[in-house]
Image: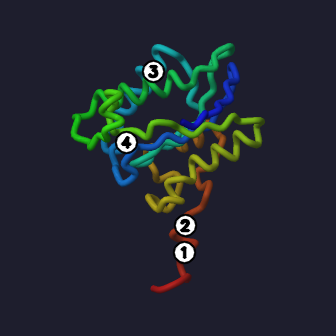
């Protein structure tokens, strides 16, 4: 078994990618209210700040800052995944290894984590988060994706409303008509 190394920094800020087991699924956006409820459930029990987030149909990118002295982001992800899974009907295929552990087959077992080193690293990852729906072709502009913190960051003056441009306008005149 692989020995995963996590960088547990008390009070740190972290970038995460968490994905569904079925990357063709649209479960997260189709059940966004249940996902929001799962986040509230975890935050009520173990507070953390969501600095930036985007929810795509099959995966989530987010930046969290943990409270001073707290380093347990894994517990929070476990609570979020479990709460969301409990809210879903048990219709997904389950492998023998998952069945032997009484696991659901909704989420990939692990997640990707990166400890943010400084403000520049933070800003680069926030940009990545907010441009992700454009990158995946869901929208032409970051501001058009409803499941992200982009609008809040525009309100807070972090981004201008037209940040990231409009890929549909940039694509005009290129390629086949």
Residues at marks 4 and 3, CA–CA distance in whole angstroms: 17 Å
Picture residue at 54% right of the left edge, 41% below the top = 17
Q: Residues within 10 Å of mark 4 (few under 14, many from 20)?
A: many
Q: Is residue 132 visible?
A: yes
Residues at marks 2 and 4, CA–CA distance in whole angstroms: 25 Å
Task: Name the secondary structure under disc 4.
Answer: helix
Residues at marks 1 and 3, CA–CA distance in whole angstroms: 41 Å
**Which residue has dot 3 on it?**
42
Left of 139 or right of it: where is 62?
A: right
Left of 141 or right of it: where is 138?
A: left
CB atoms of marks 1 and 2 within 8 Å: yes
**Which residue has dot 4 on it?**
28
The residue most toward the bottom is 176
Q: Residues within 10 Å of mark 1 (few under 14, many from 20)?
A: few
**Which residue has dot 2 on it?**
167
Q: Is residue 155 visible?
A: no
Sequence-wise, the earlier of marks 1 and 3 is: 3
Percent x, y for residue 49? Answer: 58, 25
Residues at marks 1 and 2, CA–CA distance in whole angstroms: 6 Å
Left of 108 or right of it: where is 95?
A: left
Residues at marks 4 and 1, CA–CA distance in whole angstroms: 29 Å
**Which residue has dot 1 on it?**
171
Q: Camera-side residue: 94 or 147?
A: 94
CB atoms of marks 4 and 3 within 8 Å: no
In which quadrant is the N terminus drawn?
A: top right
Sequence-wise, the earlier of marks 2 and 4 is: 4
Q: Residues within 10 Å of mark 2 (few under 14, many from 20)?
A: some
């Amino acid at each position: 078994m692989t020995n995963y190394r996590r960088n547990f920094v008390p009070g740190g800020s972290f970038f995460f990618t968490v994905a569904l087991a079925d990357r063709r699924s649209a479960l997260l956006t189709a059940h966004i209210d249940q996902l929001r409820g799962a986040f509230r459930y975890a935050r009520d029990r173990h507070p953390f700040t969501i600095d930036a987030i985007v929810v795509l149909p099959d995966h989530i990118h987010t930046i969290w800052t943990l409270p001073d002295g707290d380093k347990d982001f894994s517990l929070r992800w476990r609570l979020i995944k479990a709460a969301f899974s409990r809210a879903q009907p048990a219709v997904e295929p389950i492998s023998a290894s998952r069945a032997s552990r009484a696991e659901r087959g909704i989420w990939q077992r692990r997640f990707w984590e990166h400890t943010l080193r400084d403000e520049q690293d933070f800003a680069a990852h926030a940009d990545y988060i907010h441009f992700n729906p454009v990158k995946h072709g869901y929208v032409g502009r970051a501001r058009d994706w409803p499941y992200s913190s982009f609008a809040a960051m525009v309100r807070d003056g972090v981004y201008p409303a037209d940040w990231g441009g409009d890929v549909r306008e940039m694509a005009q005149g290129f390629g086949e008509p």
